[in-house]
Every structure is written in C-alpha cells, then in structure tokens.
Amino acid sequence: MEYLYYLANASLTLRIVEFLHGRTQLPVSYMTVIHQIDGWVVRVKMDHALDADQDGDFQAFMKELGIPYQPGIRIQMVLWGLETGQSPVEVMQRYQVAVVSHGMPDSVEIEEFRQQFVQGLGYCPETLA
C-alpha cells in the first residue's frame, strides 16, 4: 500500500516526517521525497495494508497537507527505479530529478537540502519555506 501526494513546501513535507515518527505503529517501509520547481512529491510506502481506520486517518492527514498525486511517466520511472534498488544518485542523473530522500523518513536530509538550495540561490523560494 502506498500514498502519493503533492505538497506546496518543505514545511509540509517535514510535518509528514514528524507525523510518521510519532506513529510507530504504522508499518512504514520507506518514504521518498522529490523536490520539483513548484512543490514536493512525497511517496509513503507501507509494508502491508493498513486497517480501514488507520487508512482513513492517514489519508485525512495527508489531504490536509497536500493533494493526491498522479505522476507523469518521468516521475513514475523515478519511483520505480528507487523501488527496484537503484541508487538515488543514479536515478537523479538519469531522470534529472532532485531526489531529496529515500528510505526511512528523515527530516535531516530535507533540512540539509533546503539549506543548501537556499544558500546556492541567495534567497528562499516559497517551495522551500
């Protein structure tokens, strides 16, 4: 079971990480975070299906932060590559996509990406707020 959402900024992405760290009973297999020019794609993959209550609660939480996302072919290929064990660096080079994090939910990788991106630009775009 997986959840794929599009979010407006880094703060919302970090809220998902915090939520998952606080809900250790959720069977999270991995979380993938991709930064795009106009927002963030977040995929949360579960080890197994959630029960109806957990599923409803998690979907409600995710819909508060973003919108369900239907990826184009490029992002589908990125997600498939990561799922089949290709390294994030390989995938980023092949598809020219910024894979910020792939694995267990990790706020440090997201924060570091945000800081480096902002430092390189000299200002903070809305998507990195």
Image: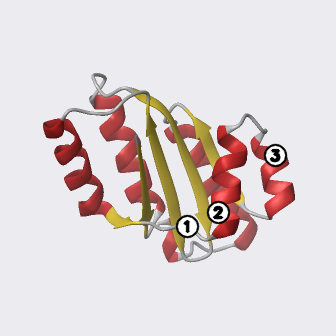
Which residue is disc 3 drawn over? 89
Gap between marks 1 and 3, in whole Å? 20 Å
Foreground residue among 18 and 91: 91
Q: Amino acid at mark 3?
A: Val
Q: Earlier in the sequence, mark 2 or mark 3?
A: 2
x and y, in percent, of residue 56 in the image: 18, 47
The N terminus is located in which quarter?
top left
x and y, in percent, of residue 39 in the image: 52, 70
Q: Which mark is in front, 2 or 3?
A: 2
Which secondary structure, mark 2? Answer: helix
Q: Amino acid at mark 1?
A: Pro
Q: Residues within 10 Å of mark 2 (few under 14, many from 20)?
A: some
Q: Residues within 10 Å of mark 1 (few under 14, many from 20)?
A: some
**Are dots 2 and 1 in contact, CB under 8 Å?**
yes
Which residue is disc 1 drawn over? 71
Q: Amino acid at mark 2?
A: Ile
Q: Residues within 10 Å of mark 3 (few under 14, many from 20)?
A: few
Foreground residue among 63 and 117: 63
Give residue 75's mark.
2
| Residue at position x 71%, y 72% in the image | 121
Gap between marks 2 and 1, in whole Å? 6 Å
Give residue 99's mark.
none
Colouring rule applied to residues:
secondary structure
| Residue most extreme to the top | 25
Q: Earlier in the sequence, mark 1 or mark 3?
A: 1
x and y, in percent, of residue 83 in the image: 65, 39
Foreground residue among 9 and 118: 9
Q: Quadrant of residue 22?
A: top left
